[in-house]
Amino acid sequence: MIPFAGSPLNRVSEKRIDSNWIESKWRDPSSLVLPLRRLEPFILGSEKSAPPLQLGLINARLVDSFASAEVPRIFLGLDGDTAVFAIDVPEAGEQQLAGLGYFRDARMAASMVSLKDAAIIAQAKALIDWHERHGFCPRCGAPTKLVDAGYRRLCGKCNAEHFPRVDPVVIMLATEGEACLVGRGKHFPPGMFSALAGFVEPGETIEEAVRRELFEEASVKIGEVTYYATQPWPFPSSLMIGCFAKAENRDIKPDDIEIAEVRWVERKVARELIEGKQVDGLRVPPPIAIAHHLIKTWALGGK
Ligand SMILES: [Zn+2]
């Protein structure tokens, strides 16, 4: 399973427009809420606890004192019959939760909780982040308000509707015979190499984006493109679309704008890299990233 995928929650999206149902679920004593403070999810217990960490899904009554109408509150879905919400904790609320747990950077937290809890973090963080950045209408500039339990914003002046955005990104492992292509972005830590990636542009298919990005970043010509899997990536709102791409030859050259270095890696070396080893000063991303799973699937002969 790829981290951030596989949420245990039933989104019951048809219920979001029923504000009475949403309010009754919020008032239900069994309902749970995941607090986020500055986009960091709440974790139960002490910062000294060893992983796996326990995601801070707490009784909704524990946030009553600061859950005013102005505080973004989002319905995430049902876990069985239990409603699960997320709330953007204001400064005043932070102190009140202090005895129960702590807030932790979302990427770090996601790699230390269960896969199911990581998927809940992905949904909650991406939505709250979107609300924080869309307080004003891009059409007329007037304030917008949260409706449909957090899945729509409505402009109070021109009535324009705005929906949470998901930005498609292609991330692809080019292969040629027994080698795969990895690159080092200019902002990467030293030695870190990954599958190349880039945003899908308007009017472009996934396959076209894969070919364009690989040619732009590594000057490599691509034939067949095949789909692997997708991963929600809430930093802030991407959907990573993992693909394999067959290169026509091994001629490569980094663009020197985004990519500092590109390299072909033989399959047997790739197998060592996905075990977390460093080979010739080179390492690849950990399992939280879909790039790891692309490299692993190919290295173990799945593609
Ligand atoms: Zn407007």
Image (cartoon, grey):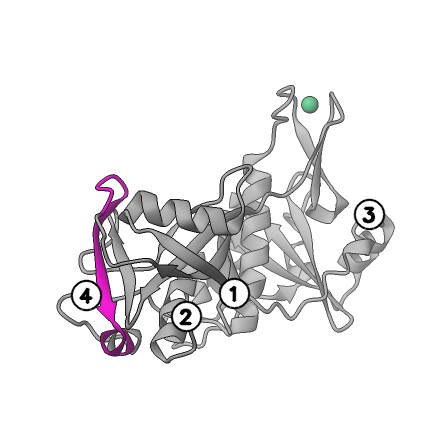
Task: Give the amino acid type for the residue marked by disc 3 in the picture.
Answer: Ile
Task: For the C terminus, give its image quadrant.
Answer: bottom left
For residue 49, say whether it is visible: no
| Of callouts 1 and 2, the N-terminal one | 1
Q: CA distance from mark 3 to mark 4?
A: 50 Å
How far from the left and from the top, in percent, is residue 55? 53, 68
Question: Label 4 sits on what residue type?
Answer: Leu
Q: Label 4: state its secondary structure.
A: loop
- Categorize mark 2 by other alpha carbons within 10 Å: few (<14), some (14-19), many (20+): many
For the point 29% across and 61% down, the residue is: 181
Labels 3, 4: front one: 4
Residue highlighted by disc 1 = 229
Residue at image x 46%, y 46%? 209
Question: Considering only order in the chain, which callout, 4 or 2, is on the residue closer to the N terminus?
Answer: 4
Task: Answer yes or no: disc 4 within 8 Å of ligand 1.
Answer: no
Measuring from the top left, give residue 34's x and y in whole percent: 60, 60
How busy is the neighbourhood of tag 3: few (under 14 within 10 Å), some, or many (20 plus)?
Answer: some
Q: Which mark is residue 282?
A: 4
Q: Which residue is mark 2?
A: 293
Q: Distance from label 1 to label 4 (Cα)?
A: 25 Å
User: Disc 3 designates what residue?
Assistant: 17
Which of these two is toward me, 221 or 125?
221
Determine contact: label 3, label 2, CB under 8 Å: no
Left or right: where 30 falls relative to 62:
right
Mark toward the start of the polypeptide (3 vs 1): 3
Q: Which residues are magenta?
A: 254-271
| Label located before the other in sequence (1 or 4) | 1
Three-letter amino acid code at disc 1?
Ala
